[in-house]
Image (cartoon, coloured by chain):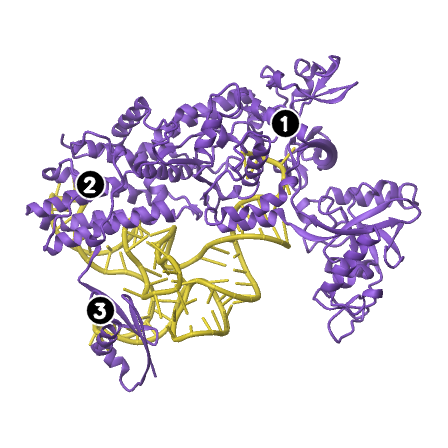
Amino acid sequence: MALSSRYDPQSLEEKWQKIWSEKGAFDCDIDTSRPKYFLMEMFPYPSGRIHMGHVRNYCLGDVLARFRRLQGYNVLHPIGWDAFGLPAENAAIKNGTHPAKWTYSNIDNMRAQLKRMGYAYDWRREVATCRPEYYRWEQEFFLKCLKKGLVYRKEAPQNWCPSCHTVLANEQVVDGRCWRCDSPVEQKDLTQWFFRITAYADELLADLKKLEGGWPSRVLTMQHNWIGRSTGAEIAFRIEGREEDIKVFSTRADTLFGVTFMTLAPEHPLVESLIAGRGNEPEIRAFIERTRNMDRLDRQSETLEKDGVFTGAYCINPFTGDRIPIWLGNFVLADYGTGAVMAVPAHDQRDFDFARRFGIEIKVVVSPAGQELDPASMTEAFTEPGVLVNSGEFTGMPNDEGREAIIRKLGETGRGGPTVNYRLRDWNISRQRYWGAPIPVVYCERCGVQPVKEEDLPVLLPLDVQTCDDGRSPLPSTPSFVETVCPCCGGPARRETDTMDTFVESSWYFARYTSPRKDDAPFDEKALKYWLPVDQYIGGVEHAILHLLYSRFFTKMLRDCGYFPRELDEPFSRLLTQGMVLLGGSKMSKSKGNIVDPDAMVQKYGADTVRLFCLFAAPPERDFDWTDSGIEGASRFVSRVWRMFADMEALLAPVKACSDLSPARDEAIRSLRRIEHATVKKVGDDIGSRSQFNTAIAAIMELVNAVNQYREELATTQAGCACLSSAMATVLTLLFPFTPHLCEEIWQALGHEDMLDAETWPEWKEEALARDAITVVVQVNGKLRGRVEVPAGSGEDEVRGAALADAAIVRHLEGKTVRKVIVVPGKLVNIVAN
RNA sequence: GCCGGAAUGGUGGAAUUGGUAGACGCAGCGGACUCAAAAUCCGCCGGUGGCAACACCUUGUGGGUUCAAGUCCCACUUCCGGUACCA
């Protein structure tokens, strides 16, 4: 079959998409005869249309999927929809559409867009998290966790709009005000459900080691710091006149004798009882309100102006017996440590600033060796190591030794002891939203909080509700949902109307892909065992912490609940974090509205060109700013490949990649063959180990250039034609993961019976790479001064001799004495002379 | 603020383990083909000086280590991501 001279992507792409779809070409099942490869990209939120960030993400995955297929792996490559979430409710408010309708119609649109890109998905496994068949299982997980104590309830402050009477997402708070009505946002305590992720803090931290090599080190570092394990001491300060303690966490127990005040977070639970009835109670309350409603990022800022108020109450230093005034401070965070800080102004900068501002005593207890510090003249806290002073029996000890001794004594006296603290907080999953998975509990007046019975799952999210214009969830005002009976006593009860954080759905979807249609259990045990863990996960770096940490937590939790194999500790063996596709320098996102619609590009250039350009434009990890120019280059290249085959009809034969290995003396044949094999080596390495797809494409371009350069010369002989045919087949095979439609079409035109997808990845041969001579660069004092050609395999002495004999080098060495000659075999000679 | 990144020609980027800076593209310029245009093909393309050979400068800024630094170390600048209810 001859190729038409014109490349027409639209028709040939649709042709191959139809063939793939009819054949179920990418459907896969358990096959123990082949190595498995579970590859996933982060599933999209169905925002309406796919954007270039999606395209980039799925192109990266698709190249790997097709590459691994050629390598003989049994590849599982699924896709689904992260379908619950806030934007559906916003759309409901804005357009009056029901969140479900909006979501499902977006899914339909986006599915069609993805199919038009030609991605190699097993579409039978598609999941949408908003379907009861999906979310019922996480309701079950929730109940299991509740039983195990991994889920619990506690009060937590929420953004509250007093005028809309609704909780606001952080995104909905703009400069401290409600995004819809502009009222100042308040903090309101609500009882919320939490996953006890901190129970896994140590394992989550320790297992980061298992991910080294497979995950980018910056992600590991970020997770490490996010968990933020720190060892220190818990110290109890008795409140004066009460039988109650204020507990603090401190990494600086060595400075215990230097405590001159206590600072509590305004949210600390003891605050209420400490200030009740004080003369300045209104002033204190005003301070608390002010601080609580501050911007949460500002409040953590180091440049924050330290503010505080004295409560009038005192506590007692457990060692010195000193009366310690209890203050409230705007820089103390309620959810770190115990929400209380023993303040040592001499040795902590924040405490120092605070003490100076409010005229509180500064007491030095650590001195630099052989020096004395004068509190009155200090300009900043002394935080370096030193020797303990003014510290009773501990005076004279180096401070780190003193810390151990003081912690020991705290234990002996029952006033504290060593403890570990984490920055990581438990995961609040309660959302006062409609479009989410219902939390499966009911509230009974008689029996209290009761879990829904497992056999009564799923708790269906009612779809026949009128969504509210003010952003409030319609669930509390939907009697058919709220009113129920207690699973315990059968009496009247109210359903929980909060739904789950959408991060819950995305924490386990990878496992559901292994048995997505199973309806009597969340997972098929055999499928889990065969497919998990995910071999390669690809997604945006913006998920480096939350989503990835939650998924890791879920994996450990589901393992411990008996759902996952015992030996499965981590969900994702390898992670590729792609950079963002920016537009005009900032993140493309549905909320910002700066989105490039790929459809127009596909219309104009075809999916293959769009795929190729997305991967060629930048390395995967790097952000790139989308521009319309540049795709022209990809388009030209694709056409050039087409034309190369169309023009050389005489060579059209079912030849395979790297098939010509006949001995050749012809320099052109040896040259082209060397380039062919070097390209196979580089492209395999770039895709398979380096994840540098842009350089893989550049290498294929160079091979195409080489074929075009040699074709006139080689086409005249039979041996030359064999060499050209082989190189051209190699081009097709290497390019196939990037531009599969084009390559299948040409492959078929060459007369192959099987699809290119059924080929095996070509093997490069060392002997094809061999050269007779190599060029060595010669430097004098580190500056490039010449090049010499030496026979391949020359020894160090020969290379040095050739370098020193080179005319240009001799000229540069005139009047100088050679001090040293460094020879880097096969590469470079550097002559040091003066 | 804190945590994590990034910065290389006009431009996207390459340089894989400290060893030829600018691969491969885009844009631009010159030429061929054409009545003309598009497409295609050929050539040039970091800066300064020079007719040239060539020399000097150049990887955000300032220091340092080394025979050799885009790459390692220290100190900065700017931009980007995350910061627990956007996903």
Q: Position of residue A1 (x, y in %)?
A: 14, 30
Q: Residue beneath label 3, please?
A: A794
Left or right: B9 in relation to A680: right
Question: Mark 1 Cα within 10 Å, few/some/many (few <14, many 20+)?
Answer: some
Could you tell me residue A208's position as x and y percent?
Answer: 54, 47
According to the picture, the residue beneath numbered tag 1 turns out to be A144
Q: Disc 3 and disc 2: Cα gap in Å?
A: 35 Å
Q: Is residue A49 left or right of residue A708?
A: right
Which residue type carries mark 2? Ala
Residue sitting at 75 percent across and 49 percent down? A332
> Which residue is more in the foreground, A240 or A608?
A240
Q: Are marks 1 and 3 in contact (CB under 8 Å)?
A: no
Chain coloured purple: which letter? A
Q: Position of residue A374 (x, y in %)?
A: 80, 71
Classify 10 Å Cα crowding around label 3: few (below 14), some (14-19), many (20 and above). Answer: some
Return the residue at label 2. Answer: A729
Chain ID, mark 3: A
Indicate which label's residue lies in the foreground, 1 or 2.
1
Q: Which quadrant would the C terminus of chain A be assigned to in this image?
A: bottom left
Residue A289 position (above or below residue A16): below
Q: Are marks 1 and 3 on the same chain?
A: yes
Left or right: residue A259 versus residue A751 is right
Colour of chain B in the rendered structure image:
yellow
* Badge 2 element: helix
Mark 1 vs mark 2: tell me if same chain.
Answer: yes
Count of marks, rendered view? 3
